[in-house]
Amino acid sequence: MAMPRVDFYVLASADPAARLRFACRLVEKAWLHEHRVRVELEPGGGAAFDDLLWTFADRSFVPHECLAADGEPRGPAAPVVIAEGNASGNDDRDMLVNLAAGVPAQIQSYARIAEVVDADEERRRLGRERFRFYREQGIEPQTHEMGDDS
């Protein structure tokens, strides 16, 4: 299987809420382009992202579901799933939006991986580690510097 395309979106702000809002817009855009998206978060981060995906824009609707701890969906199949802590499960997604600190599992399963990194010092450090990991795997990640109005 081919290696995925990896894009790093580097935000100017250190505000964690701005990072999540940017991720919501990225997920919405991917869904509108008919991608099946998995959003990977740290354990405990799924509920907040779930709420934000409902409310980040007045006229927006992104059909999504949260995976349970066992990797099974909590609701009907949706084009976007929210997973915490590398939750396993049957995953037919073609795009991964990584908001977790580590490298996602089974990167070869995705055609595209989007990494969202803000200006927080620790998240930048962890983002650099993931960038190096991808390069070691033979992937040349693309970096997109996003302005303050990301």
Image (tube, rainbow, N blue to C red):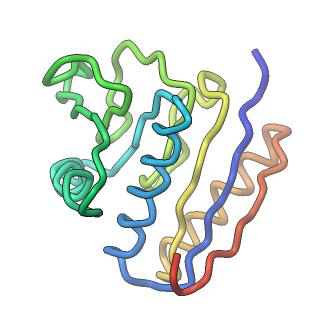
Residue 60 point in image, percent of width and height? 30, 52
For the N terminus, give its image quadrant. top right
Residue pictured at 28% horizontal, 56% vertical: 59
**Image check: 45 left or right of 104?**
left
Front residue of 70 and 28: 28
Residue 56 on image: x %, y %: 27, 63
The answer to which quarter of the image holds residue 106 is top right
- Name the side, left or right, on which 34 lies relative to 85: right
**On screen, residue 100 above or below 89:** below
Q: How many marks can you see?
A: 0
Residue found 57% across the figure and 55% down from its top: 115
Q: What residue do we see at 71% from left, 48% from top?
A: 133
Above or below for 46 versus 142: above
Q: Position of residue 42 (x, y in %)?
A: 32, 51
Residue 93: x %, y % from top left: 49, 23
Pick whichever, 119 or 144, lies toward us. 144
Q: Is residue 58 above or below residue 138?
A: below
Q: Which residue is painted at 28% across and 35% down in the image?
A: 63
Decide if residue 127 is on the left or right side of residue 39: right
Q: Depth check: give the residue in front, 43 or 98.
A: 98
Q: Relative to 27, does residue 89 appear above or below in the rendering?
A: above
